[in-house]
Image: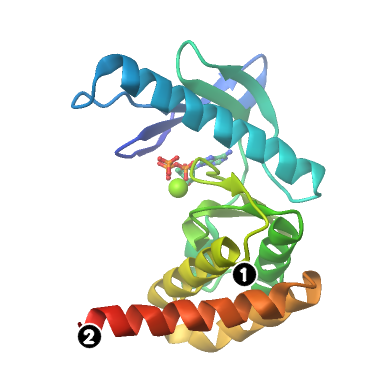
């Protein structure tokens, strides 16, 4: 069993399950909150993640196949995506970066066209499987048509992209072009991103 990651909130392990290669994602119960509140928070996070993964799949966005949802034990079992994180692929220069950035913009555009806001849209939460960018980690996501929320998603993507790939910042324009081509409301969202950036600069000065 390979441990992918033991984060503050979730633990991910590779395993075999009913003859398949899977990843088991368990939510770790934190000790410092009230135990029953803690449980219900974890349960609603998992429900949320599962619901959004299914919505995304319905919208034609590549996401891992879900095999099992176990609310008793705070865990989901999903297909293991064989491929590296988009973050590592772009940093390592292994993949065709332009093509990967086109895919990133498409995935983001399709999400928002379907009123799904991811909540943690970064290249760490995208896996490269062949030519596809597979989106994971929907636990902070929500269904909303609010342009502001979509703007926050794209703002985070830009910040994360530019900090992880500062030497390839020109690539982000490919992401934006592809986003706007995919989603009719895309240009309006990118205007919001500019507003959010301005607000950020203003509050930092205070
Ligand atoms: N289906 C999968 N196939 C292959 N690797 C995966 C899969 N799901 C997750 N991983 C690996 O595990 C890492 C962490 O997963 P994920 O982003 O879902 O967890 P997290 O960031 O710890 O969670 P959360 O933000 O919900 O607390 C990913 O970056 C990826 O490397
Ligand atoms: Mg993550």
* Left or right of 96 on screen, residue 151: left
Q: Which mark is residue 72?
A: none
- Is 32 positioned to the left or the right of 71 in the image? left
Front residue of 46 and 24: 46
Farthest-out residue, bottom: 170
The answer to whether 44 appears left or right of 163 in the picture is: right
The circle drawn on residue 205 is: 2
The crowding category of the residue bearing disc 2, from other C-alpha atoms within 10 Å (few below 14, some 14 to 19, many at least 20), is few
Residue 88 screen position, x and y as percent: 48, 62
Q: Secondary structure at mark 2?
A: helix
Q: Looking at the picture, how far across and down is residue 6, in whole percent?
A: 33, 36
Q: Along the line of sight, which residue is nearer the eye, 73 or 205?
A: 205
Name the residue at 67% across, 29% down: 66
* Residue displayed at 49% across by 61% down: 122
> Which label was assigned to residue 95?
1
For residue 96, above or below residue 48? below
Image height of 43 relative to 156, above or below? above
Taking the spot 18% from the left edge, 27% from the top edge, the residue there is: 32
Q: Residue furthest top?
A: 72
């Amino acid at each position: 069993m390979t441990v992918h990651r033991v984060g503050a909130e979730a633990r991910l392990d590779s395993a075999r399950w009913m003859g398949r290669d899977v990843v088991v994602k368990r939510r770790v119960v934190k000790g410092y909150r009230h135990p029953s509140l803690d449980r219900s928070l974890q349960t609603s996070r998992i429900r949320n993640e599962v619901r959004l993964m299914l919505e995304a799949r319905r919208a034609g966005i590549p996401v891992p196949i879900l095999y099992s949802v176990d609310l008793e034990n705070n865990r989901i079992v999903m297909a293991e995506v064989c491929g590296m994180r988009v973050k590592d692929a772009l940093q390592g220069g292994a993949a065709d970066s332009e093509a990967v950035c086109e895919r990133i913009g498409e995935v983001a555009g399709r999400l928002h066209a379907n009123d799904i806001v991811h909540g943690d849209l970064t290249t760490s939460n995208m896996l490269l499987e062949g030519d596809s960018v597979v989106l994971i980690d929907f636990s902070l996501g929500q269904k909303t048509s609010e342009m502001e929320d979509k703007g926050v998603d794209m703002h985070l993507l830009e910040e994360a992209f530019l900090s992880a790939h500062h030497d390839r910042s020109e690539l982000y324009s490919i992401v934006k072009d592809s986003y706007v081509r995919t989603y009719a409301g895309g240009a309006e969202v990118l205007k919001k991103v500019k507003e959010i950036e301005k607000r950020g600069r203003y509050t930092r000065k205070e």
